[in-house]
Image (cartoon, rainbow, N blue to C red):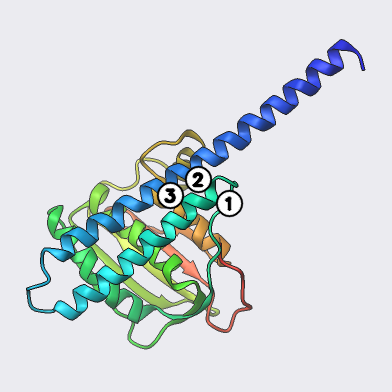
Amino acid sequence: MSGLALLVALAALLAAGLLWRRRCLSLVAQASHELRGPLQSALLGLHGLSDDGQHGRVAAIDLELRRAALALEDLSAAARGRRACGSPGEVELGALLSQAAAAWELLARDRGASLVVEPPLMPVRVRADRVRVAQALANLVANAIEHGGGEVRVRARPAAGGGARVEITDGGPGLPAPLSELVAGARWRRERRGHGLALASVIARRHGGRLVTAPSPRGARLVLELPGADAPARRAR
């Protein structure tokens, strides 16, 4: 092998190593980011256990702590450049939204925003990992509360052709950049802003769904699309 060819091969190996390191660091950064949200919500919820509606808050805290536990598993798996595997099954979105709403309401109140959760008029079932979907939705709601503000509205509806849509809208100025740029920026540049969006996008994609934006007269509107309960099972990671 000539000297030039050897240099080219070494440069290629170095570039591959740097890309792998950046990928691992991005996964660690996202997992660390994910720990902050549920722990903050759990702490806020614990202060209100003596209030009315204690059962709902306890259920919300349980869900938040499950998110934190899964984030720790992700952090351990990040050393291998992966995320922890999930357990997909049938998830009823109305029940999940109702359970999570108590924690979201506390966060909204703490940040001076208002939250409206619209349960579906009929059961909406998807095939997904329940805690992963809770992760995605909690990050989207937290992003709307922290960066949008005003009235944050969450609604789940059946999607045309099967599946389901969960829409999160806020009363803020809208996204500062296209969704794809925010997701890519968090993934490769380790920016603090956008990690929640990037995580929600990954979760949607690995369930066979997607995270998209939709037109809104004011603020941002993000839509999490998930396959219906009759869709073929996928291994959520």
Quadrant assignment, res 66: bottom left
Give 34 or 193, whichever is nearer the viewer: 34
Is residue 102 positioned above or below 200 on the image? below
Quarter in which the C terminus is drawn = bottom right
Mark nearer the N terminus (1 vs 2): 2
Find out whether the residues at labels 1 and 2 contact each other: C-beta distance under 8 Å.
yes
**Residue underneath mark 3:** 31
In the rendered picture of this protein, how many numbered marks are placed on residues?
3
Residue 104 image offset from top left, x and y in percent? 23, 64
| Cα distance in 3D space between marks 1 and 3 | 11 Å
Please give left or right for residue 218 compared with residue 234 in the image: left
Question: In the figure, is residue 150 to the left or right of 36?
Answer: left
Image coords of residue 200 (percent x, y): 44, 57
Q: In this view, does 5 lie to the left or right of 95?
A: right
Which residue occupies the foreground of this view, 173 or 191? 191
Q: Nearer the viewer, residue 66 or 52?
A: 66
Q: At 13% across and 59% down in the image, what residue appears?
A: 109
Can I make out residue 213 in this image? Answer: no
Q: Residues within 10 Å of mark 3 (few under 14, many from 20)?
A: many
Query: Does the residue at mark 3 contact the one at mark 2 (Cβ under 8 Å)?
Result: yes
**How many other residues sit within 10 Å of disc 1, few (<14), some (14-19) or many (≥20)?**
some
Secondary structure state at the residue bearing disc 2: helix
Q: Is residue 106 visible?
A: yes
Q: On the image, numbered disc 2 is attached to which residue?
A: 27
Q: Mark 1 points at which residue?
A: 82
Amino acid type for the residue under numbered disc 1: Arg
Give the x, y percent position of residue 95: 33, 81
Q: With respect to residue 66, does 23 lie above or below?
A: above
Q: Which amino acid does the dot numbered 3 rest on?
A: Ala
Q: Residue furthest left?
A: 51
Q: What element carries label 3?
A: helix
Q: Where is residue 183 in the image (x, y as percent from the top left)?
A: 47, 45
